[in-house]
């Protein structure tokens, strides 16, 4: 008698273990598919991480969007450490304390993690993990006491400036000029005052740290040189020029910047040529509390001596 396959013990074993066998076949096929596709998936994932990193870095501004950029970087485990390292180095180079205070906890987290230990740089002891190196640099910088600096009393002319809002409310403050330290810029400023070019000009840029207006010269006129002198810092109340983008050392001949809070990161980059000597506190309130639709115009500007 000839037995069919269904009558053999092997068929009986297959029937009892068919789900296991099917599972093993599916597993083998899945593993083969993964081995084939994994390199492609990894390459695509790395490409997406690189694109995100480039976008975050390109739009990063240590003055305005550290927290926002950090939140975007945290969306990707690869981008996060890259961004923290690059942003910390940039903030150190710019001496931006506020940005470093935000980034320091992130560096501490990375320094304590095992994942970041493979990112190393040469050191006296052999090699040190990058987050540890950066964290020490940040700690050393922040440990330095904030510089207690003051600008000297302006010895040049005093200029009274009155600004008016849309409801005819006015505010007056006084500025003293550094005619000896920045003669070229103060001469241009006084010429604009005497010619009446500032009257009617709006404080076109109002931000947390500054207010600015135009009218000192013409945008087509020659750029002003940078008049850098020791002892003139970008403190709250400082009147300064602004740089011409892409032209280091060249100062815009038309625009004036008035700082309402200290910004040492711009020391040495633009010319400080005056200081608010009366009315700074009220000016700070006016600038910092200005509404989105609120504007101010210079209604009067005079030299008092």
Image (tube, rainbow, N blue to C red):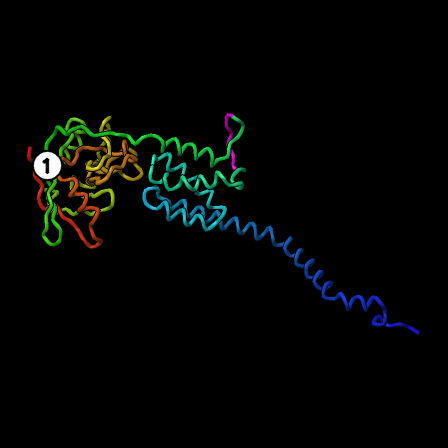
Q: Is residue 123 magenta?
A: yes
The structure residue drawn at horizontal position 52% and vertical position 26%, both measured from the top left corner, is: 125
Q: Is residue 142 magenta?
A: no
Q: Measured from the top left, where is residue 212 in percent x and y?
A: 20, 43
Say which of 237 and 139 sits in front: 139
* Label 1: which secondary element: strand
Which residue is outermost to the bottom? 1
Q: Residues within 10 Å of mark 1 (few under 14, many from 20)?
A: many
Q: Is residue 211 left or right of residue 72?
A: left
Say which of 161 and 214 sits in front: 161
The structure residue drawn at horizontal position 69% and vertical position 58%, both measured from the top left corner, is: 28
Q: Measured from the top left, where is residue 189 in percent x and y?
A: 14, 36
User: In which quarter of the view is residue 249 placed?
Assistant: top left
- Compared with 146, 13 (above or below) is below
For the question of whether residue 58 can be seen, the reply is yes
The structure residue drawn at horizontal position 12% and vertical position 28%, both measured from the top left corner, is: 155
Q: Is residue 230 left or right of residue 305?
A: right
Over which residues does the magenta segment extend?
Answer: 119-124
Q: Measured from the top left, where is residue 63 in percent x and y?
A: 32, 42
- Compared with 274, 19 (above or below) is below
Q: Quarter of the image for the C terminus: give it.
A: top left
| Residue to which mark 1 is pinned | 159
- Is most of the magenta stretch helix, strand or loop? strand
Q: Quarter of the image for the N terminus: give it.
A: bottom right
């Amino acid at each position: 008698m000839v037995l069919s396959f269904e009558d053999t013990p092997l068929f009986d074993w297959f029937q009892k273990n068919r789900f296991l066998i099917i599972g093993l076949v599916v597993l083998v096929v899945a593993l083969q598919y993964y081995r084939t596709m994994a390199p492609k998936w990894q390459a695509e994932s790395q490409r997406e991480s690189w694109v995100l990193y480039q976008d975050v870095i390109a739009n990063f501004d240590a003055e305005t969007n550290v927290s926002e950029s950090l939140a975007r970087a945290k969306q990707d485990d690869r981008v996060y450490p890259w961004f923290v390292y690059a942003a910390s180095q940039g903030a150190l180079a710019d001496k931006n304390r506020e940005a470093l205070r935000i980034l320091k906890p992130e560096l501490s987290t990375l320094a304590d993690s095992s994942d970041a230990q493979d990112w190393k740089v040469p050191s006296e002891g052999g090699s040190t993990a990058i987050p540890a190196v950066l964290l020490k640099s940040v700690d050393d910088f922040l440990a330095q006491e904030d510089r207690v600096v003051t600008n000297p009393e302006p010895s040049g002319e005093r200029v009274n400036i009155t600004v008016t809002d849309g409801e005819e409310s006015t505010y007056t403050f006084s500025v003293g000029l550094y005619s000896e330290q920045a003669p070229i810029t103060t001469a241009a400023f006084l010429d604009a005052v005497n010619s009446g070019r500032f009257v009617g000009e709006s404080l076109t840029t109002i931000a947390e740290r500054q207010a600015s207006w135009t009218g000192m010269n013409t945008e087509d006129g020659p750029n002003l040189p940078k008049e850098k002198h020791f002892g003139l810092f970008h403190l709250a109340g400082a009147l300064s020029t602004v740089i011409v983008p892409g032209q280091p050392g060249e100062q815009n001949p038309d625009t004036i910047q008035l700082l309402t809070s200290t910004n040492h990161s711009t020391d040495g980059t633009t010319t400080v040529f005056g200081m608010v000597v009366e009315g700074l506190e009220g000016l700070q309130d006016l600038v910092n509390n200005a509404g989105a639709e609120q504007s101010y115009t210079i209604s009067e500007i005079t030299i008092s001596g």
